[in-house]
Amino acid sequence: MRDAVDACLTKAFRDVAVPEGLAERLLAGLAVAQPRSHRSRRWLLVAGGLLTAAATIVFAVWLGIPKAPCVSEEFACETAIQSFENGFEQRGRLLANAPAAFPFSPQVLPIRGTRWQNLNDFLGHPGVVYELGPAGARAALYVVACKNVTGVGTAPAAQPTFTTAGCCASAWQEDGLLYVLVVEGDRSMYGRYLMRRSPVA
């Protein structure tokens, strides 16, 4: 019985006519599909390579961004004293016209006759210097857009933290700015330029 069924099926397959050109169409379809597959893989490889290159460039740029080096309070005070000793080329502008970006500190005595000048580069940052009026000695207040100074507080020290070349100085951070007070004279002279602080209860 099984042999008879197989014989019938074989005869039926032999009797079915193969469409003309079927082999050529199948071969052509395979030829088209193969390049598309290659193109898809090639595009994935190119896209992956571009993404890798972009990530490498971003990482290299991030590494190459110069980081502002931290400086110590002593270095900031010493730099301010050197600038102070070099003097000012000319009298600056009146305190009333001071720039809002670099305000005079409310913790320093606003002496009559105080003037200010622009600083193009102080510790690598812009700012201003206030030339304080006469109070028995020369003094200056440096205000700089610099946040990378270590070891400074949020108010001027009651006693100067750095003394050299006949000058006293201290530095502090206030509202995101660096302030450096330089006074020509001793510690007692330095204290004359500070606002009196209310006693702590």
Image: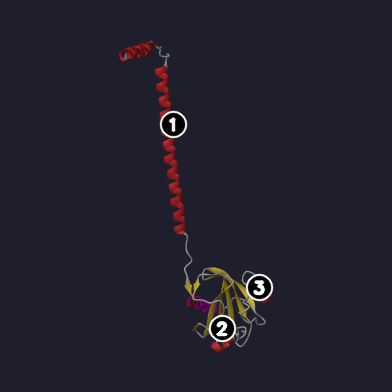
Distance between mark 3 and mark 2 Cα atoms: 20 Å
* Image height of 42 relative to 151, above or below: above
Q: Is residue 53 visible?
A: yes
Distance between mark 2 and mark 1 Cα atoms: 80 Å
Task: Please tell me whether mark 3 sits on a helix, a strand or a loop.
Answer: loop
Looking at the rendering, the stretch of residues picked out in magenta corresponds to 75-84
Q: Which mark is residue 183?
A: 2
Q: Position of residue 165 (x, y in %)?
A: 50, 84
Q: Which mark is residue 98?
A: 3
* Image height of 106 relative to 191, above or below: above
Of callouts 2 and 1, the N-terminal one: 1
Judging by the rendered image, the residue that carries numbered circle 1 is 36
Q: Position of residue 27 (x, y in %)?
A: 39, 22
Task: Please tell me whether mark 1 sits on a helix, a strand or a loop.
Answer: helix
**Amino acid marked by disc 2:** Val
Residue 20: quarter of image: top left
**Amino acid marked by disc 3:** Ala
